[in-house]
Amino acid sequence: MSEKSKYFYEPSSAFATTDSQACGEESQADCDKKFMLMAINEAHRALKLQEVPIGAVVVCAGKIIGRGHNLVETLCDATAHAEMQSITAAATTLGGKYLKGCTLYVTVEPCVMCAGALAWSQIDRVVYGAADPKRGYSRLQGQIFHPKTEVVGGVLAEECEQLMKDFFSKLR
Ligand SMILES: [Zn+2]
């Protein structure tokens, strides 16, 4: 199976599935933790590349349709944040620019750029782990996300934050 087909989104089944069914029998909280662990896996991939360990996945109808991790150093691109990588991957999988019915899981609170990109994507939900008081979008006043986008913070926050702390303590 190719890398792409492994995550390929099947429109026939997925479009018939509403968001509440996406987690099956699991509660929303359990489902959020499960996918946050996948985002943490992505953060570990960034760490292996000596990148700031932030990872993200985009989920639609209970399936991961895009994943990404921070690649700022690798790509020498200040915009190569985990969210940007996974938004692009998810749109490629879907074959459309909008991520309606999707949830993005990211290990750290999105920055203003990524929150703006997520707003453009019209994504339904954003779930993040650790808060980022210095660079997170929520330090700004006003609405960045689409008013209908549900935002949940603090999912597996300790694990997500520990990755960042370990990384930055090694740099010092
Ligand atoms: Zn960002």
Image (spheres, rainbow, N blue to C red):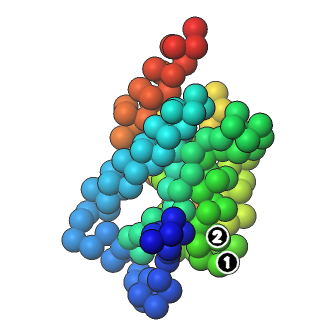
Q: Residue furthest top?
A: 172
The 10 Å Cα crowd at callout 1, few under 14, some 14 to 19, many 20 or more, is: few
- Ranked by sequence position, the earlier of labels 1 and 2 is 2
* SS type, badge 1: loop
From the viewer's perspective, is 107 left or right of 35? right
Q: Is residue 170 above or below residue 147?
A: above
Q: Which quadrant is home to the C terminus?
A: top right
Residue at numbered disc 1:
96
Taking the spot 72% from the left edge, 64% from the top edge, the residue there is: 120
Residue drawn at the location 71% of the way across and 56% of the way down: 117
Is 109 on the left-hand or right-hand side of 113?
left
- Residue located 69% across and 37% down the image: 74
- Residue 44 picture location, percent across and down: 46, 37
Mark 1 and mark 2: span between their CA atoms?
5 Å
**Marks 1 and 2 close (CB-CB < 8 Å):** yes
Q: Is mark 2 within 8 Å of ligand 1?
A: no
**Residue under numbered circle 2:** 91
Question: Vertically, is 79 above or below 2?
Answer: above
The quarter of the picture where the N terminus appears is: bottom left
The reply to whether residue 80 is in sight is: yes
Q: Which amino acid, by three-letter code, is at mark 2? A: Ala
